[in-house]
Amino acid sequence: MVARTVTHTLVGLDPRRVEVEAHLESGQPKFAIVGLADRAC
């Protein structure tokens, strides 16, 4: 199952759109960050 949502965050005083996608499947839990992750992650 794939889920997708759109949210916003602030960079300084500028709002930025953020798209988040999650893929759920049965089995062992996994966590992966793909794309341009920030150093804070």
Image (spheres, rainbow, N blue to C red):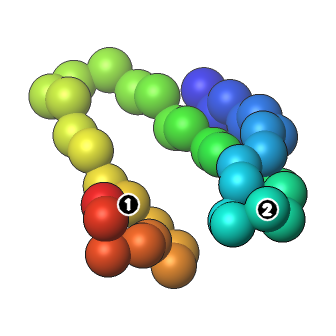
Q: What residue lies at 52% left-to-right and 38% top-to-bottom? A: 23
Is the C-beta separation of discs 1 and 2 under 8 Å? no
**Type of amino acid at the residue the image marks with label 1:** Ile
Nearer-N-terminus badge (1/2): 2
Residue 6 % position (x, y):
81, 40
Distance between mark 1 and mark 2 Cα atoms: 26 Å
**Type of amino acid at the residue the image marks with label 2:** Leu
Front in this rendered view, residue 38 or 27: 38
Per the image, label 1 sits on a secondary structure element best described as: loop
Residue 20: which numbered mark, if any? none
Is residue 16 at all visible to an observer of this figure? no
- The answer to whether 22 appears left or right of 32 in the picture is right
As drawn, the residue found furthest toward the front would be 13
- The answer to whether 41 appears left or right of 30 in the picture is right
Asked if 27 appears above or below 22 in the picture, the reply is above
As drawn, the residue found furthest toward the left would be 28
Q: What residue lies at 52% left-to-right and 75% top-to-bottom? A: 35
| Quarter of the image where the N terminus is located | top right
Circle 1 sits on which residue? 33
Task: For label 2, count other residues whose C-alpha is less than 10 Å away and answer few (under 14), some (14-19) or many (20+).
Answer: few
Circle 2 sits on which residue? 13
As drawn, the residue found furthest toward the top would be 26
Q: What residue lies at 65% left-to-right and 33% top-to-bottom? A: 2
Of the residues tagged 1 and 2, which is closer to the observer? 2
Asked if 30 appears above or below 1 in the picture, the reply is below
Quadrant housing residue 33: bottom left
Asked if 4 appears above or below 8 in the picture, the reply is above
Is residue 40 at all visible to an observer of this figure? yes
Front in this rendered view, residue 22 or 19: 19
Residue 25 % position (x, y):
41, 27
Q: What residue lies at 68% left-to-right and 30% top-to-bottom? A: 3
